[in-house]
Image: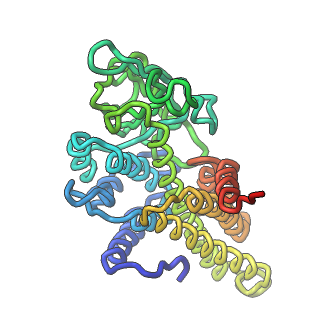
């Protein structure tokens, strides 16, 4: 079978078997119908809570399973094989739990992590703004002291996955006077932990979630804007308790997010391959299954090889992060390769399906609209290439 992972523990293998059974039974039969209606998968999310996936990486002392990034990434690949939007529902939650585990104060960890492990509190995170693109250091959202013991947040945020359903949002804002005032702009940024009620419209004084952004794919999961206009946040909701460290915290979150995007690409690509190889053995032309035509065989061979390559790089990136090593090179490579290979594998599958691939009755139509999101999520391919090249130049720097 494709995309096998060597060296897993018995616990990891059992977790993955459980998730795959859930995907086959609870997600694949309903994914396309829900996606076409752009309907939030409430029953599936309830099932994920029952499985404990919202607390997969939360330490056991806070009620989670205490598993590794690798275990999480492999679960994401399985979920994405069923429906990529489901993996998006748990991904932003996972990034916020990661930020809290690594940077949160003892009070913040104790307050949020036990309820996040059960899925009672659901996380989202927010950096991007309209017109900002990939230049995170240029954000304009601001947090200013309120004259008491807190901050007032003002600004417009964009592309919040789970923006409507989340009850905790990690928000990056500029805080003048924090960090090094004379240094680069990213040294005066702070991550705030904003607690909110789920829903749309003005959901709190100074906080509005306008509604879902309509998208060509990645449906079901709510993607929103967030408008802050004097939103009051207490000082004890500065992540880590010290302002001015937000940029570095968020970049760490994005790094694990890139491993997640690579895992999504692996899962979507694997499903596209499964659909293609099954269809190629059922569809007949010129008196034989199209799988017996050399042109189709070449496509299947290319697809399988790309899936294996992407999976191997994704696993390597996850293991590097789990080992505590700097992982931006591995994560950038994994995200870049997996996203590109996913797009290519999905297109090969689409071509193998012929005219039927254009029909909404066939699952490949949905995958064809989902794959492009991976090319831009957690940083475009061009951003990944910049990161990769800079790290390579550091490693191979010539002197003299």
> Taking 143 as reference, is 30 above or below it?
below
Specify whether 214 is left or right of 102: right
Quadrant into which the C terminus falls: bottom right
Specify whether 376 is left or right of 124: right
Colouring scheme applied when the structure was drawn? rainbow
Which residue is at 40% across, 71% downward? 20
In the depicted view, which residue is nearer to us: 300 or 102?
102
Which residue is at 34% across, 53% downward? 45
Specify whether 243 is left or right of 132: left
Q: Could one spot residue 37 in this view of the protein?
A: no
Which residue is at 29% across, 56% downward? 58
In the depicted view, which residue is nearer to us: 51 or 263?
263
In the depicted view, which residue is nearer to us: 310 or 363?
310
- Quadrant in the picture for residue 299: bottom right
- Residue 345: image location, x then y, percent: 67, 67
Q: Could one spot residue 7 in this view of the protein?
A: yes
- Residue 223: image location, x then y, percent: 49, 39
> Taking 27 as reference, is 10 above or below it?
below
> Taking 188 as reference, is 327 above or below it?
below
Q: Outermost residue toward the front?
A: 400
Specify whether 373 is left or right of 103: right
Tag count: 0
Q: Outermost residue toward the top?
A: 147
Which residue is at 58% across, 33% downward? 137
In the depicted view, which residue is nearer to us: 90 or 190?
190
- Residue 41: image location, x then y, percent: 39, 50
- Residue 344: image location, x then y, percent: 70, 64
């Amino acid at each position: 079978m494709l995309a096998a992972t060597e060296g897993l523990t018995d616990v990891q293998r059992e977790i993955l078997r459980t998730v795959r059974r859930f995907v086959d039974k609870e997600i694949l039969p309903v994914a396309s119908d829900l996606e076409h209606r752009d309907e939030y998968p409430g029953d599936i999310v309830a099932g994920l809570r029952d499985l404990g996936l919202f607390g997969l990486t939360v330490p056991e002392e806070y009620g989670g399973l205490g598993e590794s990034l690798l275990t999480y990434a492999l679960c994401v690949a399985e979920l994405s094989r069923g429906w990529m939007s489901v993996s998006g529902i748990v991904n932003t939650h996972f990034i916020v739990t990661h930020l809290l585990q690594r940077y949160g104060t003892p009070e913040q960890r104790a307050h949020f992590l036990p309820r996040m492990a059960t899925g009672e509190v659901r996380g989202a995170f927010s950096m991007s703004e309209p017109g900002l693109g990939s230049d995170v250091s240029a954000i304009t959202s601001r947090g200013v002291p309120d004259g008491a013991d807190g901050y007032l947040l003002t600004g417009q945020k964009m592309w919040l996955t789970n923006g409507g359903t989340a009850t905790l949002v990690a928000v990056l804002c500029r805080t003048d006077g924090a960090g090094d005032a004379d240094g680069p702009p990213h040294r005066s940024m702070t991550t705030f932990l904003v607690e909110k009620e789920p829903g749309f419209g003005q959901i709190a004084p100074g906080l509005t979630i306008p509604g879902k952004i309509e998208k060509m794919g990645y449906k079901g999961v709510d993607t929103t804007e967030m408008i802050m206009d004097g939103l009051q946040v207490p000082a004890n909701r500065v992540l880590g308790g010290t302002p001015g460290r937000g940029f570095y915290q968020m970049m760490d979150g994005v790094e694990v997010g890139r491993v997640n995007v690579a895992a999504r690409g692996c899962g979507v690509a694997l499903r596209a391959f499964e659909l293609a190889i099954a269809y190629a053995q059922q569809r007949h032309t010129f008196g034989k299954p199209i799988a017996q035509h050399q042109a189709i065989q070449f496509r299947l061979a290319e697809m399988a090889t790309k899936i294996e390559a992407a999976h191997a790089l994704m696993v390597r990136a996850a293991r590097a992060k789990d080992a505590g090593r700097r992982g931006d090179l591995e994560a950038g490579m994994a995200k870049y390769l997996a996203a590109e290979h996913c797009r290519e594998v999905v297109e090969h599958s689409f071509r193998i399906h012929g005219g039927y691939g254009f029909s909404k009755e066939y699952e490949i139509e949905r995958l064809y609209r989902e794959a492009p999101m991976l090319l831009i999520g957690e940083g475009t391919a061009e951003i990944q290439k910049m990161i990769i090249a800079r790290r390579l130049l550091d490693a191979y720097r010539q002197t003299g």
